[in-house]
Image (cartoon, rainbow, N blue to C red):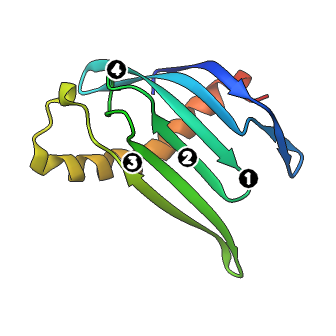
Amino acid sequence: MLSQRLLSSEGEVVYKGLTFWPSFVFEREWRYRGKVFKSDLRVDVSPPGKFREAFKDDHGLALKGSYWEDIYAEMPEGTSISTRADFTPSPELNIPGFLQGWGLKREMSRSDAEDFRYFKNNPELFH
């Protein structure tokens, strides 16, 4: 992730002393294989149970309607996180169909570390 810019937000919800927007839209810029892509995403947050990001447009990394979501549940041994995704890569990426699933799994597995690094370096994104 190269940059992120808030476009709109709706309401506020407080959970365990932290304030969240239950819904917001932002523009995110990524670099993939040397090319820069921008996409608008809608985020829906329902603490403590759900976090979902969905693409709002057909340009950038994925086609409109593509999404991923995490569902959280407290378990005796800790928090369980279940991730679901329906992701259709943009034709702009020029990824052959047989490689799309493998590539998506690889990128998603690296995205958490990349997001944490971005947010650590941009604390003003928290409100």
- Comes first in the chain, label 1 or label 3: 1
Q: Is residue 14 above or below residue 30?
A: below
Task: Tell me the element at label 3.
Answer: helix
Q: Amino acid at mark 3?
A: Met
Q: Amino acid at mark 2?
A: Arg
Kindly identify which numbered label has been placed on residue 52.
Answer: 2
Q: Nearer the viewer, mark 4 or mark 2?
A: 2
Task: Tell me the element at label 2.
Answer: strand
Residue of label 1: 47
How far across and down, in percent of the image, does residue 81 sit? 57, 64
Q: Residue furthest right?
A: 17
Q: CA distance from mark 4 to mark 2?
A: 20 Å
Q: Which residue is found at the position 81% from the left and 35% from the top?
A: 12
Q: Residue furthest bottom?
A: 76
- Comes first in the chain, label 3 or label 4: 4
Residue of label 4: 37
Q: Amino acid at mark 1?
A: Pro
Q: Quadrant of residue 119?
A: top right
Tell which of 97 and 123 is nearer to you.
Answer: 97
Numbered disc total = 4
- Comes first in the chain, label 1 or label 2: 1
User: Mark 1 Cα within 10 Å, few/some/many (few <14, many 20+)?
Assistant: some
Q: Nearer the viewer, mark 1 or mark 4?
A: 1
User: Mark 4 Cα within 10 Å, few/some/many (few <14, many 20+)?
Assistant: some
Q: Quadrant of residue 65?
A: top left
- Comes first in the chain, label 1 or label 4: 4
Q: Which residue is found at the position 79% from the left and 28% from the top?
A: 127
Q: Nearer the viewer, mark 3 or mark 2?
A: 2
How far across and down, in percent of the image, does residue 31 sit? 34, 24
Q: CA distance from mark 1 to mark 2?
A: 11 Å
